[in-house]
Image (cartoon, helix red, strand yellow):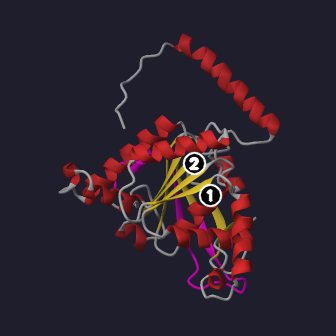
Amino acid sequence: MNMSVPRLTLLSDLVSDFVADTEAAQKALESGRPRGPVTGLSRLDETIGGFFSNGLHILQAAPGAGKSAFSLQVAANCQFPALYLTAEMSILELFRRIIARETETYLGKLKTGELGAKEAMRLALETVKKLPIFALLDGTSGYASPQQLLDVAESLKEKAGAAQALVVIDSIQVWAKTVRGVDADFVGASEYELINAALGSLSALASQLKSPVLAVSHRNRVGNRSNDASLHSAKGSGEVEYLAESVIDLTRKDEQPDSNGEVEISLKLLKNRHGVPGLNIPLKFCGRIQKFREVM
């Protein structure tokens, strides 16, 4: 992506933009539709200003807290076109998990051969019908450049006639390392340098796309050992606290599922440029159907 240059703007030149933005907000309010991609969790959406603002957002968690399941659920519920780049899991496995959540079908049943072809087709078509503008991009076998992400997301926006899209990167650490195979400048780069460069490129992508980008992040070793995560818990990066519009952390509270097959997950909003940070939201996660729900 080309680097943009700073633009000088007088306050008087912003009046028409401000009025247009206010009118757009009013129309969205009257229509009952969000102005931008949402998470689908009412308390979280309310706290971040009603929807994901344009810019970079971070979802971090230790292993086993459901990072991928959470980000898949957000992408499915965002009410806008969604592009999900997977750098860790196969797209078929992701599709299987999406089907489990959307149809509330036991994930294990989708893997063991218990379903016949006719039932598998029914569940798949039911899922696709619910999510017509949800695309998966396979980054497990090669580097998906920011320009490629921009082009695909723009095409999804055009196809849906939408002003915005949600782009999800899962995970930022693995995606950042794949650049070594295509860019000689990064061959000898450290993990820290790769991740910070990747975060910068995703922030630029969000700006060009005029949409939110959600980067899924592993916690570092200190963060994994602690139940009190911070902005410094993201693995390999020092730029999160500066670049991100919001930082969401997931912490698993239960070792074993309860009688309903659910575990308690604590969601903490570590950074929030559009509201008050520090909010704790109790969630329940059912791994069998890959679904999070708020605990009221």
- How many C-alpha atoms fall within 10 Å of the one at disc 1: few (<14), some, or many (≥20)? many
**Nearer-the-camera pick, 36 or 136:** 136
Q: Is residue 271 visible?
A: yes
| 2 relative to 110, above or below | above
Residue at the (43%, 71%) spot, across then down: 226
Q: Secondary structure at mark 2?
A: strand
Numbered disc total: 2
Which quarter of the figure is the N terminus placed in? top left
How far apart in space, not on screen, are marks 2 and 1 (Cα)?
A: 9 Å
Q: Which region of the structure is painted magenta?
A: 237-266
Q: Secondary structure at mark 1?
A: helix
**Mark sitting earlier along the chain (2/1):** 1
| 141 relative to 40, above or below | below
The amino acid pointed to by label 2 is Leu
Residue at the (51%, 46%) spot, across then down: 152
Question: Seen in the image, is 87 located left or right of residue 194?
Answer: right
Residue 73 at what x, y percent from top left?
63, 62
**Nearer-the-camera pick, 192 or 138:** 138
**Nearer-the-camera pick, 227 or 54:** 54
The amino acid pointed to by label 1 is Val
Q: Is residue 144 magenta?
A: no
* Image marks 2 and 1: residues in contact by CB distance under 8 Å: yes
Report the residue marked by disc 1: 74
Residue 194 at what x, y percent from top left?
29, 54
- How many C-alpha atoms fall within 10 Å of the one at disc 2: few (<14), some, or many (≥20)? many
Quarter occupied by residue 296: bottom right
Q: Is residue 256 magenta?
A: yes
Report the residue marked by disc 2: 166
Residue 241 at what x, y percent from top left?
41, 48
Q: Nearer the viewer, mark 2 or mark 1?
A: 2
